[in-house]
Image: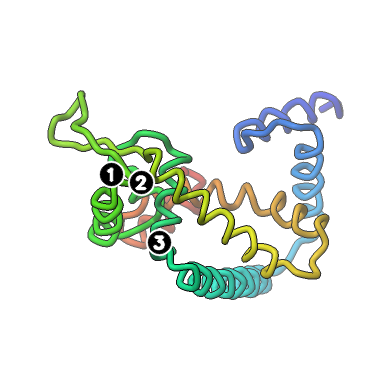
Amino acid sequence: MKPVVELVHEWSAFEELDTEHSVERFCRYYLEKQRQKTLPKAHSERIMSGAFLLKTIGRILSAYSMYFRAAVNYIGIPPAESFYYLNGLQHLGEVRKSDLINYMFAETTTGMEVINRLVREDKIDERASPDDKRAKLIKINDKGLAALQEYYKVSGKVVEMTFKDISDETVISCYEMLKYCEQRNSAAAIELKNKPFDQMYEQVMAGKM
């Protein structure tokens, strides 16, 4: 296959994974994909490397969450969970309650508690779905958007704390390299949420997601 044809095929694959189709992002994607081909690892070593990566990401996120909870408590705004749900709803637009809960990877009971609290606080509007009167559609309203802006101010400071002394280039590179992993697993987790683990594993590893 001619190099230019190969690049066209790679670009097509990249477009399906990334919503921001810039040349710079494609180059990062392509170079990382080629690097993985030249670094074969034993299966056990790959699993250990993945486990260490997940542990590192998890501990970074835990530190961020601790800072963020402390910040919202300090300035007296509602719990951090409200921010995550309002932010998710702004991203999704008007959706069913179950759509937001799935997007948050939450259990139905927990998700409904947070959503109903935000409805009572008049930060989310709800209405009957015109397609299914049994379902409720929800969307963030002006009061919710105002609250979200307060959360963003706090979150910005917490992000600064979390990545202090880490260069912008490192942060951007990490984001670019892990974005595909996040997108693939986000889609898979929503679809496989209520299936037994053996089915989850089989479908993900078979590349059917």
User: Answer yes or no: do the residues labelled 1 and 2 have beta carbons within 8 Å?
Assistant: yes
Q: Are marks 1 and 3 in contact (CB under 8 Å)?
A: no
Q: Is residue 31 placed above or below 153 in the rendered structure? A: above
Residue 119 rendering spot, x and y as whole percentages: 26, 48
Using the numbered discs, state the Cα–Cα distance from disc 1 to disc 2 in whole angstroms.
Answer: 5 Å
Q: Judging from the image, what secondary structure is the residue with disc 2 in?
A: helix
Is 137 above or below relative to 62? above
Q: Tell me which residue sits at (46%, 46%) in the image.
A: 146
Can you identify the residue that label 1 sits on? 97
Query: Horizontal and vertical percent for residue 111?
Result: 29, 56
Q: Earlier in the sequence, mark 3 or mark 2?
A: 3
Residue type highlighted by circle 1: Lys
Name the disc covering residue 100, or none.
Answer: 2
| Mark 1 crowd level (few <14, some 14–19, many ≥20, 10 Å Cα) | many
Which residue lies at the image location 80% right of the left edge and 32% below the top edge?
Answer: 23
Residue 170 sits in which quadrant? Answer: bottom right
User: Which amino acid lies under the numbered mark 3 shown in the image of this protein?
Assistant: Glu
Measured Cα–Cα span from mark 3 to mark 2: 13 Å
Of 113 and 103, the residue lying toward us: 113
Query: Quick check: can you spot residue 47?
Result: no
For the residues carrying marks 1 and 3, which lies nearer the camera in this image?
3
Per the rendering, the mark at residue 81 is 3
Q: Nearer the viewer, residue 113 or 180?
A: 113
Residue type at mark 2?
Leu
Q: Residue furthest right?
A: 3
Question: Is any part of residue 8 visible from this angle?
Answer: yes
